[in-house]
Image (cartoon, rainbow, N blue to C red):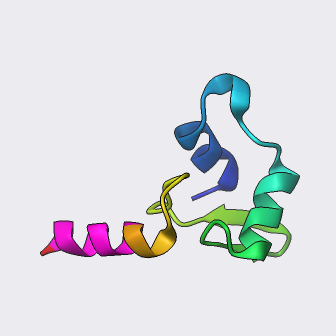
Amino acid sequence: MKASKWAHREFDKDSIPNPRTIKRWVKDGIVNGRIIDGSVWVFSSEKMGVATSISNHVNALIED
């Protein structure tokens, strides 16, 4: 999903990080996503404040 939509979903209105911050998080592996042709995309399964590995395990349990 677009990083901006993800940020609006995960953060309160007054605490949404700027696009450069999210891009840095994706580059640094803090948030699981991709940068494609300069656009930042975040996997919709990402939850801020929850480690990606834990989120992946929870999603796998839910799908079973």
Position of 25 with respect to 64 (left or right) is right
Q: Main secondary structure of the magenta part?
A: helix
Is residue 63 rendered to the left or right of residue 36?
Answer: left
Residue projecting furthest to the left: 64
**As drawn, is 47 to the left or to the right of 15?**
left
State the residue at coordinates (64%, 56%): 2
Query: Within the magenta stretch, is there residue 57?
Result: yes
44 on left or right of 39? left
In this rendered view, identify the residue nearer to me: 9 or 39.
9
Q: What residue sits 65% from the left and 25% below the top?
A: 13
Q: State which quarter of the image contains the C terminus.
A: bottom left
Residue 25: horizontal and vertical position, in percent?
A: 75, 64
Span shown in magenta: 55-63
x and y, in percent, of residue 15 in the image: 71, 31
Q: Residue 51's spot in the image, x, y percent?
A: 50, 66
Find residue 57 and report its image quarter: bottom left
- Viewer-proximal residue, 36 or 16? 16
- Front-lying residue, 26 or 54: 54
Query: Is the residue 6 above or below the residue 24 in the image?
Result: above
Residue at image position (76%, 56%) is: 22
Quadrant holding the N terminus: bottom right
Q: Is residue 50 magenta?
A: no
* Of residues 41 and 55, the one drawn nearer to the viewer in this rendering: 55
Quarter residue 31 falls in: bottom right
Total marks placed = 0
Residue positioned 60% across, 28% down in the render: 12
The quarter of the picture where residue 17 lies is top right
Position of residue 23 measured from the top left corner of the image (x, y, whole percent):
80, 62
